Image (cartoon, helix red, strand yellow):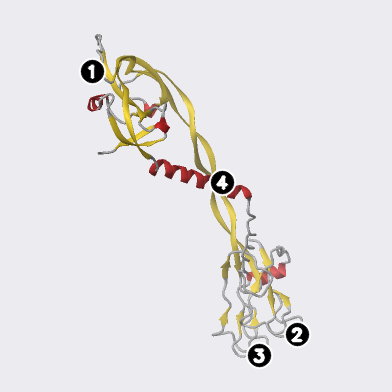
Amino acid sequence: MAVREGKWKCEFCGGVNLGRDMKCTACGAVRGEHVEFFLDEDAQEVTDEGLKNIAEGGADWHCDYCGTDNRADAPVCKQCAAPREGMKSREESIVAGSGSGSAGGGSGSLSSPPPMPEARRSPLKFILMGVAAVIVVLAAVFIFGGREDVLVLDDGSWSRSIGIERQEWVEYTVWEDEVPSDALVLDYWTEERGTERVQVGTEKVKVGTKDKGNGFFEDVFEEQPVYEEQAVYDTKVRYEIEEWLEYRNVRASGGLEDSVSWPDTGLSSGDREGQRTESAELLFHSTDPEQEGEVFTYAKLSPDEMSSFVKGSEYKAEVFGNTVRKFLDE
């Protein structure tokens, strides 16, 4: 384990001393009980055998009689000769990282990040806000706007269609676990499907620093897993399966006064009816002279509902642009 020498700050004169110093080198005051060690970020590893022995000797102990710190192997206080028995040793502790260079304790202190500068006000931001406001207003007008008008029904049209399906063989390529049970497999092969995170070993990672309680610090390492992204292979399958597919479409259409019906499907052997669709549209003109020449449409109805409308009749309606939104009761 790498050992590094810390420092401590004299509580009387503020002088900074090496971890090995038992007295302040500036004023001569003994290292007090409440003095805390810190570690410079650039502290070098200790190579001197004598200092290593001090570091590995254990935590210092504090004399309750004269206030002097003593090495772990000292049987009596070097200042007043009081026996060590019953005296309290400094605590060893794990700290997150090296100190900041001040007498604030082994763990140091992490400075808060500087406040972010006030963002400049971009003209683009206000332009986008303006566009968004316009969109909201237009949407509100579309949803809640409109005007009342009296319309005359001119004509209408309707359309109905039916898809005709038959079974055909269709080919697909999927992963093996996606193949339907009734599929006819044509071919298969191995292919990379993705990756997965796999542990391939371990490595020692420095996770902190141990304050040894005697002016020295020791790097703390932890065995942590090492991961690697590895390819995952799977079986790819090409298969065929019978599916109902639309191969033709029959259609019937007519005007406002034509009878509404579904088209004749003319099903052949092996065919079946597929999706049915229908649509209808009514055409109006306004009784308002200012709207002369304008055509208004209404398509929110089915062909069967067209029978309730009479060509040439007037209908009170709410319109938006050239679209009839709804009819109003008299």
Look at mark 3 in the image and give the residue it sits on.
80
Q: Secondary structure at mark 4?
A: helix
Find residue 109 and report its image quarter: bottom right
Q: Amino acid at mark 4?
A: Leu
Above or below: residue 242 compared with residue 25: above
Q: Measured from the top left, where is residue 206 in percent x and y? A: 60, 57
Q: Measured from the top left, where is residue 200 in percent x and y? A: 53, 43
Alpha carbon distance from label 3 to label 4: 79 Å
- Between disc 2 and disc 4, the foreground one is 4
Residue 259 tag number: 1
Q: Amino acid at mark 1?
A: Ser
Q: Measured from the top left, where is residue 112 in percent x and y? A: 61, 65
Alpha carbon distance from label 2 to label 4: 67 Å
Look at mark 2 in the image and give the residue it sits on.
27
Alpha carbon distance from label 2 to label 3: 20 Å
For the residue carrying disc 3, how many other residues have a C-alpha within 10 Å: few (<14), some (14-19), or many (20+)? few
**Taking 313 as reference, is 319 left or right?**
right
Alpha carbon distance from label 2 to label 1: 114 Å
Q: Answer yes or no: is residue 280 visible.
A: no
**Taking 106 as reference, is 172 left or right?**
left
Q: Amino acid at mark 2?
A: Cys
Among the two numbered marks 2 and 1 on one chain, the one whose residue lies closer to the N terminus: 2
- Between disc 3 and disc 4, the foreground one is 4
Proximity of marks 2 and 3: CB atoms separated by less than 8 Å: no
Q: Secondary structure at mark 2?
A: loop
